[in-house]
Amino acid sequence: MIEKKYDMDNKKKEVIMAVDDLSRALNKYHGNSETAKYVSETLIELKKDESVAFLGTFQFFITKASILKRSEGVVLNNQESNLWHRVTSFRDLGYKLFSGMGLYW
């Protein structure tokens, strides 16, 4: 159990670093967009959340940020696109936790 906690702590740090990098890039190039504001606000929440709440916030974030980005017509530059892909690469993070409840995405 300690090993899983340690792994989750490391993953949380990686996710937060990735979202932080994305937030800084979006604020630099799309500072007035709702997408940039939402990413910044969610970063604050992710830093506070623990375990299941963190995973839930992160999963919801990926979906909502994608929708906002598309609906606003935000076009990501190469740097932002790479950061976006880095953030979304963590989308499977909660699957093992939620698989026992039958929640497969």
Image (cartoon, rainbow, N blue to C red):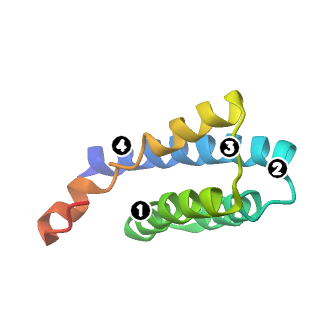
Horizontally, residue 73 falls left or right of residue 32, namely left
Callout 4 crowding tier (Cα within 10 Å): few <14, some 14–19, many ≥20? few
Residue 23 in percent (x, y) is at 72, 49
- Local SS, label 2: helix
**Residue 39, placed above or below residue 60:** above
Tell me the CA gap for discs 2 and 3. Answer: 11 Å
Whole-number angstrom distance, CA of label 4 to CA of label 1: 14 Å
Residue at which label 4 appears: 7
Contact between marks 4 and 1 (CB within 8 A): the answer is: no
Measuring from the top left, give residue 38's x and y in whole percent: 69, 65
- Give the amino acid type for the residue marked by disc 1 in the picture: Leu
Mark 2 nearby-residue class (10 Å; few <14, some 14–19, many ≥20) = some
* Separation of marks 3 and 4 at Cα, in angstroms: 23 Å
- Residue beneath disc 2: 30
* Mark earlier in primary sequence (2, 3): 3
**Type of amino acid under label 4:** Asp
Q: Is residue 24 rendered to the left or right of residue 22?
A: right
Q: Residue at x 49, y 67 (%)?
A: 57
Residue with the mark numbered 1: 55
Choose mark 2 or mark 3, whichever is in front.
Answer: 2
With respect to residue 104, does 24 lie above or below? above
The residue labelled by disc 3 is: 22
Give the mark nearer the N terminus: 1 vs 3: 3
Quarter of the image containing the C terminus?
bottom left
Are the residues flagged by discs 2 and 4 in contact, CB closer than 8 Å? no
Q: Are marks 2 and 3 in contact (CB under 8 Å)?
A: no
Q: Residue at x 48, y 49 (%)?
A: 12
